[in-house]
Image: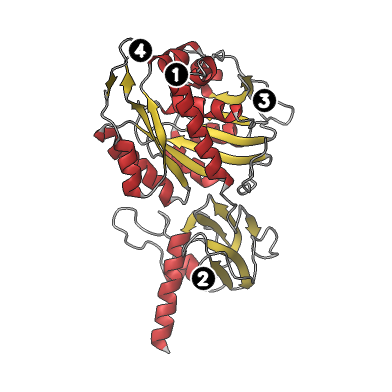
Amino acid sequence: MQTTGQAGPQRLPGISHVIAVGSGKGGVGKSTVAVNLALALRDRGAAVGLVDADILGPSVPVMLGLPVGAPPEVTEDGRVVPAERHGLKVISMGMLTGDDNPAILRGPMVGKYLSMFVAGVVWGQLDYLIVDLPPGTGDIQLSLAQSVPLSGAVIVTTPQLVSLKIARRGLRMFEAVKVPVLGLIENMSTFTCPNCGHATDVFSHGGGERMARELGVPFLGAIPLDADIVEGGDTGRPIVLDRPASAAAGAYRALAERVAGAMAGTSAPAVGAFTWTWADDEGAPAWSDAAPAASGGAATPAGIRKRDARTLQIRWEDGVVQDFDVRDLRLACRCALCVHETSGAPLLDPATVRLDVAPRALSSIGNYAVGVAWSDGHGSGIYAYDALRALGERAAAVSSENV
């Protein structure tokens, strides 16, 4: 089954939608949700892949009954062939290391493995690639948002207050990098005794739905606290597969239905993924003189182009067109080499920037920014779209005052 929604930026050819499953906190059952969501989407007829992005603490192989310490095959061109289990294509660090062998890696190496697990795998044609993230809002989450065209994110929480507070941070992180939040899942909700039928709210109840309402995001449903879910994960037979008639499996199928529905209503950003050389305009992103759809808001670009050799032009989704002098952009760089990270004091001396400085190459950074490599050798500048919009508005205000 191919989904009806338009695919996101095609940095991953053949994959219609990449969906992150995350939370700000560990211990909320996020991996269990990711595995059962993937299987429930597969049961709807979709082609599904699963990335265990918890590089340092992988758990997906156990949940799917995959052998650990059995490295996958590698093609002649160096790409990894994913394992296949229960109709899913899967990659995990747990397939490369044994149970007792920890992955002791620094941040850059973690990022390299994540890149390999997503872009360096022979996925083939997929409707959905589910990415099970580790807890937190650190390097892996940011690297994924910057390098992969995420269609959306699902946030997992338990009903208790401490989990909800941290899940809120995870949700805000995805909003900050312009990844659509598909909704919130309340995991480990009400426990119903299998013997007497009495319902008990072990971790409270309803907090996820209340938070979704407060934050204005969809509530995707509640997954019950069920011993069979735990047993299925421990034995490599997830509950959607092993007990399809159970209430918990039904909750996962309802979750899959809502996620698929959300994806069917999405469309690709007007400006997709691009790597663009300024001098010859090769690889330039999309531009249209037609009125934009106005679906993404004031800080979402509907088109980006080189108006002339010294001017970058952006048309925003709300119809506003702004021109940016490229030297002004160079001077506005907010990277750690140009602005002190703690104090915010400028480190870049404008007198050291040549008048003829120009971009060498520009590239999209996830859904939220553009990166620029400059002719003076500077290459660490990331310009968030909301910062660009604000910069253009300030320039317009100064211009009107001088008239």
Q: Position of residue 179 (x, y in %)?
A: 48, 48
Q: Earlier in the sequence, mark 1 or mark 3?
A: 3
Report if the CB atoms under discs 3 and 2 are less than 8 Å apart.
Answer: no
Distance (Cα) linking label 1 and label 3: 23 Å
Report if the CB atoms under discs 2 and 4 are less than 8 Å apart.
Answer: no
Badge 2: residue crowd in 10 Å (few <14, some 14–19, many ≥20) = some
- Regarding residue 111, the answer to whether it shows in the image is yes
Asked if residue 296 is positioned above or below residue 207 in the image, the reply reads below
- 138 left or right, relative to 376: left
Residue at the (37%, 29%) spot, across then down: 187
Distance (Cα) linking label 4 and label 3: 42 Å
Q: Amino acid at mark 1?
A: Pro
Q: Which residue is mark 3?
A: 81
Distance (Cα) linking label 1 and label 2: 48 Å
Q: Which residue is mark 4?
A: 194
Residue at the (33%, 19%) spot, across then down: 192
Q: Earlier in the sequence, mark 4 or mark 3?
A: 3
Badge 1: residue crowd in 10 Å (few <14, some 14–19, many ≥20) = some
Of the two numbered discs 1 and 2 in the rendering, the one whose residue sits closer to the viewer: 1
- 188 left or right, relative to 65: left
Secondary structure under tag 3 reads loop
